[in-house]
Image: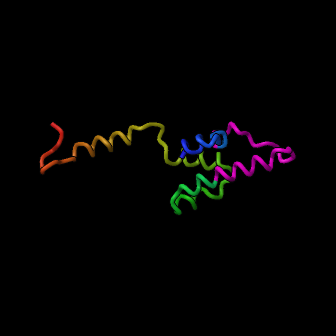
Amino acid sequence: MEMRIAAREKLGYLTGDALQPSKLSSIYSTWCREDFRVKGWLIDSMSPDLMSRFIRLSTVKEIWDAVKKTYFDGGDETFLFDLNKWAFTIKQNGAPVHK
């Protein structure tokens, strides 16, 4: 999802680089509209169960940070462990593929 949002040149809304302006600013409504657009993309990519956990957060950055805190462990070790375990269970014609 991050790549899709970056490709649409809206990554700053996830990272916080697109700072929320003051409510009195002339660009506040534009910022809100763009933040809601990115929030919609992110929320729409989630299952209904996940959606219900994050939809009430105010900004897309709040959602992104909460998702990262909840689901990202900071590395790929878990994924690599699962991949390695899976690789050693593969069989072809009843025999293990690895040797």
Total marks placed: 0
Instruction: Find out whether residue 75 is within the magenta segment.
Output: no
- Give the side of residue 24 with respect to residue 48, left or right: right
Image height check: is 45 above or below 76?
Answer: below
Percent coordinates x, y for residue 97 in the rendering: 17, 42
Q: Name the residue located 53 percent from the left edge and 58 percent from the top edge.
A: 50
Q: Which residues are magenta?
A: 14-39
The residue furthest front is 8
Q: Name the residue located 55 percent from the left edge and 48 percent from the top edge.
A: 67
Q: Name the residue located 66 percent from the left edge and 43 percent from the top edge.
A: 13
Colour treatment of the image = rainbow
- Front residue of 9/90: it is 9
Image quadrant occupied by the C terminus: top left
Instruction: Find out whether residue 20 is within the magenta segment.
Output: yes
- Front residue of 38/52: it is 38
Percent coordinates x, y for residue 15 in the rendering: 63, 39
- Give the side of residue 70 with respect to residue 57, left or right: left
Percent coordinates x, y for residue 11 in the rendering: 62, 40
- Give the side of residue 7 with respect to residue 20, left or right: left
Percent coordinates x, y for residue 7 in the rendering: 58, 41
